[in-house]
Amino acid sequence: MTPFPPAATEDEFDSLTRERLLPAVTTLTRSIGLGNTPVVPFTEGSLPVYAVGEKLVLKLYPPVYADEIGTERVMLETLRGRLPVPTPGVEAAGTHEGWGYLLMERLPGRTLAEAWPKLSTEDKTRLAPELGEVLAALHGVDDPALAALGPEDWAGFVAGRRAGAVEHHRATRLADAWVAQIPGFLDAVDLGTPAPVPLHTEFMREHLMVVPGEDGWRLTGLFDFEPAMRGAAEYDFVATGLFVSRGDADFLRRLLLAYGYRPGELGEDFARRCLAYTLLHVYSNLPWYLDILPAPPEPTLDALARTWWATA
């Protein structure tokens, strides 16, 4: 038997490659009744994920991320059959030598990120409202099981993120000229008191599946729920703007109108709230976003909000 390493810290886990874990993964799949089914690592993702045959996926949660298996499992079991597109069904779950695992159905197709260069303008025009409908359905799910998701106090979570925002962004090596604007910008944005809804938090091309068809590309699934939370719906438009529309105002507008916004609600205030949630996001990395997204016409946070969440 090949054991899993303890991976007691994030640094130790990060040093482990999926290939190095493969013998231990094979031992695990045999122990849960999958025999000699081929196991192949995926190259993407923050956690190790493996294709098991053609129809299953195995996701591993090292001890340092043990809490995330509960989040992903409750989301997958609660959402099954409740969204306009499939989410992976849970086939088995448990722990093995201190590591958590979920065995899930494999969604058909390829990621939207992989397919994006092949999409025509018509494909994107058709997919944008479908994505908005998926997010609206997700945010509309009301189930007692989702009370298990954090944070317990959304307002307290936002206040805590606000208090640590400058320190967080300095740690990402954001230029001082940008960091200096953060307190004033956040003070000027009214985030209101929205009712918490289930959030994906990483609604991005890499986590959406599509397949080509006679009428163009269509959505076939949404996955990767381990960072899910309950909170303000607009927190999910951080990843949507950064990693799906990426400055494409027409695409974002079509998505948001299908989500349920009225045209008059999509203006500068909306864009500034999205940037505020970006600055408060747990995984926010503004230097990275500035490298990969369209540059604002001037180096101000107001201009940045208009550039990345413009809808006109």
Image (cartoon, rainbow, N blue to C red):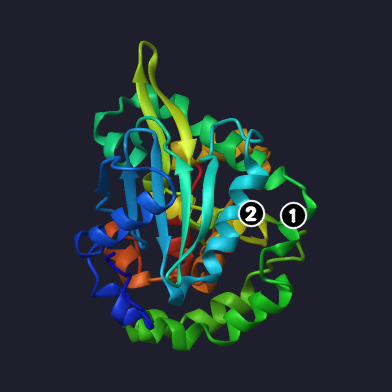
Q: Residue furthest left?
A: 19
Please, what is the three-letter code of the amino acid marked with disc 2? Val
The answer to which of 221 and 74 lies nearer the viewer is 74
Q: Which mark is on residue 145?
A: 1
Residue 237 rendering spot, x and y as whole percentages: 54, 53
Q: Residue at x 77, y 65 (%)?
A: 193
Instruction: Decide: few, some or many residues near mark 1? Use Cα within 10 Å; few <14, some 14-19, many ≥20.
Output: few
Residue 207 rendering spot, x and y as whole percentages: 42, 46
Tell me whether the residue at label 1 lies in contact with that at label 2, contact meaning CB atoms closer than 8 angstroms. Answer: yes
Q: Is residue 234 above or below residue 185?
A: above
Left or right of 61, for residue 3: left
Left or right of 3, for residue 201: right
Residue 69 rendering spot, x and y as whole percentages: 53, 62
Please, what is the three-letter code of the amino acid marked with disc 1? Ala
Tell me which label, 1 or 2, sits earlier in the chain: 2
Q: Is residue 251 above or below residue 142?
A: above
The answer to which of 186 and 134 lies nearer the viewer is 134
Taking the image as drawn, is residue 199 in sight?
Answer: no
Residue 99 sits in quarter: bottom left
